Image: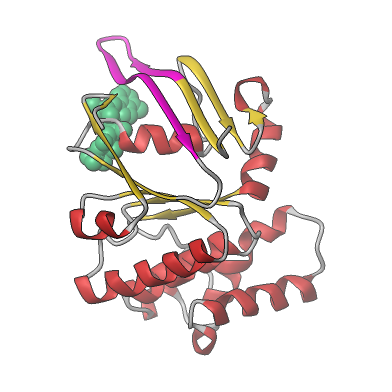
Amino acid sequence: MGIINLQGVTKIYQTKEVETVALENVNLEVKAGEFLSVMGPSGCGKSTMLNLIGLLDVPTEGAVTVDGAATGRMKDAEMAEFRNKTLGFVFQSFHLINSLNVLDNVELPLLYRKSTEKSRRETARAVLEKVGLSHRTKHFPSQLSGGQCQRVAIARALIGNPKIILADEPTGNLDSKTGEEIMRLLFELNREGTTIVMVTHDEHMARKTQRIVRFFDGRRIE
Ligand SMILES: Nc1ncnc2c1ncn2[C@@H]1O[C@H](COP(=O)(O)OP(=O)(O)OP(=O)(O)O)[C@@H](O)[C@H]1O
C-alpha cells in the first residue's frame, strides 16, 4: 500500500442551484518517496484532489488513506493534528502572512506543538539555511522577490519535518529561471526522502518528476 491511496474517490460540490462533480471514481496510489506530477486542464479537479489528500476537505464517496490513516474516520481536531505533523503545503501564491517577518512565518506551524521558543527559533533558522535564506530572517514578505517568498513558504512547509509535501503550482507565479531553482529545491527534498505531489500546468517541469498522472473532467486519463 502506498503512502497515499485514493479508492473510488468522488467529490461533488453541492450548492442550492448546481451540483458540480469535481472528481469521479478516482483511484490513485502514491508510493513513499515518489515525486508525482498531476496535470490536466483548468477545472479538471486537480486542486480538489490535493485538498482531499491534504485533509482540507472530505470526499463525497470513496476512501482517502494518508500515511496509513483512514482519514474518513477522523474528527476535525485529529485531522488538524495529522495535517500539522505529516503534511507540508506549498501554494502558487505563497500564502505568507504579510505582517510577520520571515522567521515568524516559518515558525508558525510549530506554535501548535509543544516546543520552546528557543527550539522553534533554532529549527526555523535551520530550515531557512536549507532553502538559502538565512540572510533574510528579519525581512517581511513585501520586501522579498517571488522566488524568495516561495523559499520561505517551502521552509514553513518543512519545519515540521513532514513525510509528504503537497504543492499546488509552486512555480506558477515565478519566472522560468526562479521556477527552476524552486524545482531544484523540491528535488533535493525528494532525494532526502520526502514524498511530493505537485499540481502543475508546466509540461517541462512535470517531465522531470518520476511520474505524471493526467486528469480530464474529474477522471484519470493516464
Ligand atoms: N467550493 C466549490 N463549490 C462548487 N464547485 C467547486 C468548488 N471548488 C471547485 N469547484 C468546481 O470543481 C471543479 C474542479 O475544480 P478544481 O479547482 O479542483 O480544478 P483544477 O483542476 O484545480 O483547476 P485549475 O487548474 O483552474 O486550478 C471545477 O469545475 C470547479 O468549478
Name the quadrant where ligand 1 sits.
top left
Examine the residues drawn in magenta and state their main secondary structure.
strand
202 in relation to 30, above or below:
below
Q: Determine if residue 98 is in view.
A: no
Q: Position of residue 20 (x, y in %)?
A: 27, 17
Q: Name the residue located 39 percent from the left edge and 33 percent from the top edge.
A: 49
Q: Quadrant of residue 184?
A: bottom left
Q: Position of residue 188 (x, y in %)?
A: 47, 70
Q: Determine if residue 18 is in view.
A: yes
Q: Position of residue 1 (x, y in %)?
A: 58, 32
Q: Name the residue located 60 percent from the left edge and 71 percent from the top edge.
A: 104
Horizontal relation, residue 58 to residue 126: left or right: left
Q: Is residue 183 magenta?
A: no
Q: Quadrant of residue 174?
A: bottom left
Q: Is residue 27 magenta?
A: yes
3 and 81: which one is in front? 3
177 and 103: which one is in front? 177
Q: Quadrant of the C terminus?
A: top left
Q: How is the image coloured?
A: secondary structure
Q: Name the residue located 37 percent from the left edge and 79 percent from the top edge.
A: 144
Tally the numbered discs.
0
155 in relation to 134, above or below:
above
Q: Which residues are magenta?
A: 8-30
Horizontal relation, residue 126 to residue 196: left or right: right
Q: Position of residue 110 (x, y in %)?
A: 69, 60
Residue at the far bottom: name it. 135
153 in relation to 34, above or below:
below
